[in-house]
Amino acid sequence: MKVRVISADHAVAYAAKIARTEVIPSFPITPQTLIVEQLAEFISNGELDADFIPADSEHSVMSIAIGASAGGVRVFTATSSQGLALMHEMLYCVPQNRLPIVMANVNRSLGAASGIWVEYNDSMAERDSGWLQLYVEDNQEALDATLMAFRLAEDRRVLLPVMICLDGFILSHTVEKVELPEQEEMDNFLPKYDPLNILDPADPKVINPIIPPEYAMEMRYQLDRAIEHSREVIVEVEKEFAKAFGRSYGGLIDTYRMEDAKFAMLTLGTATGLARRTVDEMRAEGKKAGLIKLRFMRPFPFKELCEATKDLKSLGVFDRSVSFNGGGPVHTEVAASLCNVPVTVTGHIAGIGGRDITPRHMRDMYDLVEKATKGEDVRKVTWHGLRGDME
């Protein structure tokens, strides 16, 4: 085990290297470019035996990834924002064809009023594409989640693509201490890729044809079942990773000081660290605050959330994206999953366009959730950190 001070982008690239990725289609886009640049350097230096394929667009990147994966090799790529949107058509081909591609998405805002700073509207827009999708808190988790993603994706009970989402600039360009597994350790954890139903001229087969109504519904159902089965595999892979490397992240969700909590926030991404600090401060004041860290947006952890919140009086849900239905996508799904749990659920939108989320903002969120616990009237959804009078 080596320890280095590196960015999350470089941590993800290192993970793809020691996973022995064989094909890396690429197209540069800020703030993802450091990942594919580092992988190109690994290949140039002879540290990784892989085909690095520059493409003319992100649509082509995913097309190349599909062809390579269907041909029976381990594939990794990375993108951000507009690049992910340009892949949209091809993203839907991957899960239905059961191709275990691993991709890092370095989150940034998308569309008009876009920027190069973190926002989750890019990946949240693809949450129903059939990709497994998880969000990481720090650089170490970015590396570890990428390592586990290959094992998860290639499990025969799953055979689905995995998207690792990390906060643009906050993680992609900020350096932290990261423990880097040795190649031998990774080889023991991740076996050589054993593909299923590969393209082979000696055994012709049709992949991704036009499907009539007689078959389409069953194919969608099989995909739905595969995503459902991934829940148990996520837990298994997490346990095996913890045994091999000594680090664990809780599976679909993680919790902090929830044993006797009466109110809590649910967060994802880098805001989680700030929420954890706020919980400690409130606990020191005698307030029974807690924290739920959402790791996987797909599969969505319905059962785990119901269990974690069964003794709460109120729960706040943090969103770094907007569904324009009055709230955010995480809030919408959490509220739906807890419809039979007697807990008040409020939404809290912050950090849009990469705006800083300060300790004051997070404390304001917790204060509102505490008020809801006491039966006080609070907004169903609150935007935190707005400038000026935006009523």
Image: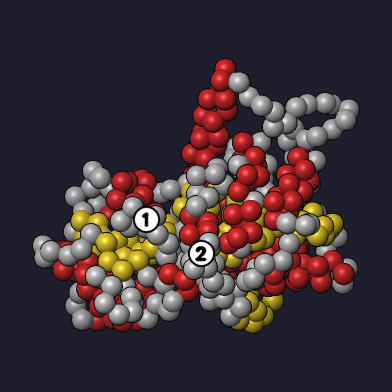
Residue with the mark numbered 2: 112
Residue ID at (26%, 77%): 389
Residue ID at (84%, 66%): 43
Identify residue type, mark 1.
Phe
* Residue at the left extreme of this rendering: 375
Residue with the mark numbered 1: 324
**Among the 4 quarters of the image, the one containing residue 29:** bottom right
Instruction: Determine the CA span between mark 2 and mark 1.
Output: 15 Å
Residue ID at (47%, 71%): 353
Instruction: Classify 10 Å Cα crowding around label 1: few (below 14), some (14-19), many (20 and above).
Output: few
**Rendered view: 110 above or below 282:** above
Instruction: Classify 10 Å Cα crowding around label 2: few (below 14), some (14-19), many (20 and above).
Output: few
CB under 8 Å between callouts 2 and 1?
no
Give the image location of residue 251, x and y in percent: 47, 55
Quick one: quadrant of the N terminus? bottom right
Give the image location of residue 67, x and y in percent: 77, 43
Please count the marks in the image.
Answer: 2
Q: What element carries label 2?
A: loop
Given residues 218 and 256, the one toward you in this image is 218
Confirm whether residue 253 shows in the render. Answer: yes
Quick one: quadrant of the C terminus? bottom left
**Among the 4 quarters of the image, the one containing residue 104:** bottom right
Which mark is in front, 2 or 1?
A: 2
Identify residue type, mark 2.
Ala
Q: Mark 2 or mark 1: name the one nearer the start of the chain.
A: 2
* Residue at the top extreme of this rendering: 214
Given residues 378 and 69, the one toward you in this image is 378
Residue ID at (43%, 79%): 356
Give the image location of residue 92, x and y in percent: 60, 42
Q: In this view, does 114 lie to the left or right of 2?
A: left
Q: In this view, does 171 lie to the left or right of 45?
A: left
Q: What element carries label 1?
A: loop
